[in-house]
């Protein structure tokens, strides 16, 4: 799977959607997915829609699912970005997997019919090859994956301006805004625990998520740059261990660690990352890598959110 970097200036419209799924009815094996009919276009489509101003792709995807299908959901793996031409330029749509929660469909102006169908039947029903390709990507993923949210700590000012212990350097005002903006993005994936390098700026970046969950932030020295300098692969091993443990962990680390971890896991899993930037694999402050692992700890999908304050996943 490949995603692009945050340099896609040619994109003039952004949207997000999902393959909304639930276990197949009547005890049948596999899953059913939701396909919607839009009377305005007289087409069958995956649920999707434009980002509101300042909205991120994960948050927009959940909102569109509620509006078009009536169901709440929890996001899973980032699937792919679809780009196509519109009158003003290029439109980009970021797609995720999403497990359906509570809800019921109510016909509305945008969507007048919803069908729960097998992925194979959905491919035949969908009006657009691009939507069918998203469903095929969904079908290629293992059904049981760990969805990890690997966060680089938010902005903490300049190291040379801080006279105290660097481990105690706090977030700046800009960093606090980034951390606040991250909370709804990370919550969209249904996190269940929070693990971080034992630095104040890392803890502060994800403390709000832990507060939302009513849990403690767990410290892990394997995620720090200090440990990484002595043993670069220790962080990789630890991330794989967390991937094998299931659930949806939020993991906060540093810019000297994340690029090596992501690049190593992508190489092992055969995942194509964006073209190398001057600094290698991107990991901006306050950014998120959404990583999906299979049962043996192999990376099977990856998506990058450069900045929760504005930019959508995969740009």
Image (cartoon, rainbow, N blue to C red):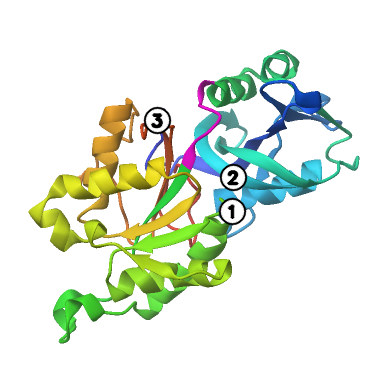
Alpha carbons under labels 2 and 1: distance apart = 6 Å
Quadrant hosting residue 295: top left
Q: Which span is picked out in magenta? A: 140-146
Identified at 24% across, 44% down, the residue is 236
Please indicate whether residue 109 sits to the left or right of residue 218 in the image. Answer: right
Disc 1 designates what residue?
A: 188
Residue 106's place in the image compared with 45, above or below, is below
Position in image of residue 114 (x %, y %): 83, 31
Give how far apart the Cα atoms at labels 3 and 1 are: 22 Å
Tell which circle, 2 or 1, labels the residue nearer the N-terminal end: 2
Q: Is any part of residue 255 visible from this angle?
A: no
Rendered location of residue 87, percent (x, y): 62, 34
* Residue 96 image point, x, y percent: 57, 38
Residue at image mark 3: 2
Give neighbour class at mark 2: few <14, some 14-19, many 20+ (Cα, 10 Å): many
Tell me which numbered mark, 3 or 1, is placed earlier along the sequence.
Answer: 3
Q: Are marks 2 and 1 in contact (CB under 8 Å)?
A: yes
Q: Which residue is mark 2?
A: 75
Q: Give the dominant element type of the magenta stretch: helix, strand or loop.
A: loop
* Nearer to me, 307 or 298: 298
Quadrant location of residue 260? top left
Taking 194 as reference, is 159 above or below it? below
Q: Nearer the viewer, residue 208 or 86?
A: 208
- Specify whether residue 11 is painted magenta: no
Which residue corresponds to the image point at 37% horizontal and 66% vertical from the top-left? Answer: 218
Side of 159 relative to 143 (left or right): left
The question of residue 145 being in magenta is answered with: yes
Left or right, 262 with respect to 57, comes to: left
Q: Position of residue 215 (x, y in %)?
A: 51, 69
């Amino acid at each position: 799977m490949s995603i692009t970097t945050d340099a896609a200036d040619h994109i003039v419209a952004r949207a997000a959607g999902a393959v909304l799924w639930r276990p197949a009815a009547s005890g049948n094996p596999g899953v059913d997915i939701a396909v919607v009919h839009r009377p305005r276009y007289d087409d069958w489509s995956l649920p999707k829609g434009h980002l509101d101003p300042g909205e991120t792709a994960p948050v927009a995807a959940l909102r569109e699912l509620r509006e078009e299908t009536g169901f709440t959901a929890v996001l899973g793996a980032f699937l792919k970005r679809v780009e196509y031409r519109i009158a003003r330029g290029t439109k980009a749509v970021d797609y995720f997997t999403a497990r359906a929660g509570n809800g019921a469909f109510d016909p509305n102006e945008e969507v007048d019919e919803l069908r729960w169908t097998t992925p194979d039947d959905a491919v035949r029903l969908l009006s657009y090859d691009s939507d069918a390709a998203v469903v095929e990507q969904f079908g290629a993923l293992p059904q049981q994956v760990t969805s990890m949210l690997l966060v680089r700590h938010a902005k903490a000012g300049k190291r040379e301006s801080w006279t105290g212990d660097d481990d105690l350097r706090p977030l700046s005002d800009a960093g606090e805004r980034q951390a606040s903006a991250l909370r709804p993005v990370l919550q969209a994936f249904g996190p269940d625990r929070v693990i971080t390098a034992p630095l104040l700026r890392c803890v502060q970046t994800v403390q709000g998520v832990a507060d939302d969950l009513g849990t403690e932030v767990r410290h892990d020295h394997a995620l720090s740059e200090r440990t990484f300098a002595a043993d670069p692969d220790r962080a990789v091993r630890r991330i794989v261990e967390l991937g094998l443990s299931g659930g949806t962990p939020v993991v906060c680390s540093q810019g000297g660690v994340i690029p090596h971890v992501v690049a190593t896991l992508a190489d092992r899993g055969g995942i194509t990352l964006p073209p190398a930037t001057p600094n290698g694999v991107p990991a901006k402050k306050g950014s998120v890598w959404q990583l999906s692992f299979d049962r043996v700890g192999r990376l099977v999908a990856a998506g990058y959110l450069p900045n929760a304050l504005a930019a959508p996943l995969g740009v």
